[in-house]
Amino acid sequence: MPFEFSFTPDQEAFRDAVRAFLAKEVAPIVPAMDESEEFPRATVRRMQEEGYFGVPVPEEYGGLGLGKVGYCLFLEELGKVDASHGTIVGAHTSLGITPLLYYGTEEQKQRWLVPAARGEKLLAFSLTEPGSGSDSGAVHTVAEKDGDEWVITGNKIYVSNGREADTIVLMAGNDVKLGPNGGVTAFLIDSNLPGFRVGRCEKKMGLHGTSTAELVLDHVRVGPDRVLGEVGKGFHVAMTALDVGRVSLGAASLGGMQAATHQALEFSKNRTQFGLPISEYEAIQFKLADMAMRVHALRLMVYHAAAHQDRMGTVPKQWSRLERVEKTREAAIVKCLASEWASEVIDEALQIHGGLGYIRGTPIERAYRDARISEIFEGTNEIQRLVVARDLLTRGL
Ligand SMILES: Cc1cc2nc3c(=O)[nH]c(=O)nc-3n(C[C@H](O)[C@H](O)[C@H](O)COP(=O)(O)OP(=O)(O)OC[C@H]3O[C@@H](n4cnc5c(N)ncnc54)[C@H](O)[C@@H]3O)c2cc1C
């Protein structure tokens, strides 16, 4: 894998435009959104109008055509401002759009991908069930064949955007006995289909602007036009989406870490104790140095992985086995380190703020609550370590 990498002038111009947009239109509403725990409809609408819900999608399919590198630039900026908005975009783009872009037929792309990339429709991704979390191939939602059609019944949980999504990329078992090896199929489920309803929405520690919903499917009947990818290959569809999601989650974490480091740095220069700004004390300087080191290392890792995914393209059938496993290992490494470093950096930034960091409503207090989930969703970090360890044992370092 080549290591050289730099942003083009167009990518830098895009990042600057995003930064200005987010500062003006999103940052001001975040504290109220966190308090009210309401989905930020107005800012999501504005971001959709700007094309920000289709950043990596080629222009021919209604997107901005900026690839994974452009998408990570966007999520890095968004991560500096708010993790809830980042999660809404990530659930839609990494997890909803990727399956359509990589596995959709031309007809499915025109029908579902184009409106999603243009920001006219919102997507979600549904793999998790009450009995199937880390063991995500053990799907219990059943898809039974009835003539040409499928009849889907089951309960899904913890679906980001689940309450608001127009369409959900949903994994169901075409043969539950087979599990991930031939037994799981990806379906495109519109939220207005008969038999589909949104169940309980969770109250959460953080990410207060996002919905985390239960989905109930009671004999939802769909035609073969809603099968995404091949029957029985839904687990591959899900894992491909998660590889993209794990790198983009790294970009959002990178943004969150930078914001926290910046806030801690400024606070330390302005807070005087024992007659000196606390930034003069080595104990604080070492914390800040460690934070900056992690930001630097993660930036290299995220854009290396994003550029790698861009080079691989969006046609899974063209990938060799080696390319697949390298991509998956790299995504797991980025996700695991990014989420743990983000938690640690934000924790240290909170410590530098002293008691103020613990006060409800400060940006660092919100960031602390928002960051924790990244060690859990899109595959827990225990599972990321299993992915890396299995590949190590098979291929070595
Ligand atoms: C806010 C939020 C948003 C989410 N959004 C989505 C979404 O949009 N779509 C979706 O499908 N899912 C979503 N999820 C679900 C999320 O991906 C799962 O919660 C996660 O994968 C873990 O599954 P689990 O909660 O069932 O934990 P479990 O799998 O029960 O794990 C419990 C603990 O056991 C550990 N563990 C399990 N197996 C092993 C093993 N073999 N070796 C070592 N340790 C192990 C885990 O790492 C964890 O620490 C979301 C969850 C939350 C909280």
Image (tube, helix red, strand yellow):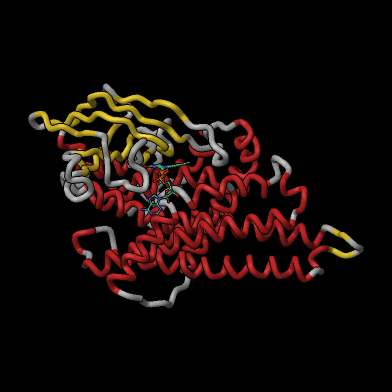
Residue 297 rendering spot, x and y as whole percentages: 53, 70
Residue appearing at x 32%, y 65% in the figure: 390
Residue 104 shows up from this direction: no
Q: Seen from this angle, which residue lies furthest right?
A: 275
| For residue 161, above or below residue 220 | below
Quadrant into which the C terminus falls = bottom left
Left or right: 49 in relation to 256: left
**Count of numbered tags:** 0
Q: Quadrant of residue 34?
A: top right
* Residue 58 appears in the figure: yes
Q: Residue furthest top?
A: 194
- Report x, y in % for residue 168: 33, 37
Q: Nearer the viewer, residue 95 or 218?
A: 218
Q: Return the x and y of residue 154 as percentages of the image width and height.
A: 28, 30
Q: Residue at x 25, y 69 (%)?
A: 322
Judged left or right of residue 44, residue 129 is: left
- Quarter of the picture containing the N terminus is bottom left
Q: Quadrant of residue 278?
A: bottom right
Q: Is residue 278 above or below residue 121?
A: below
Q: Residue at x 18, y 29 (%)?
A: 151
Whether residue 215 is situated above or below residue 171 in the rendered picture: above
Q: Position of residue 373 (x, y in %)?
A: 51, 47
Q: Name the residue: 59% across, 49% down.
A: 81
Residue nearest the observer in this picture, 34 or 351 = 351
**Quarter of the image holding residue 184?**
top left
376 and 103: which is toward the camera: 376
Is residue 149 shown left or right of residue 114?
left
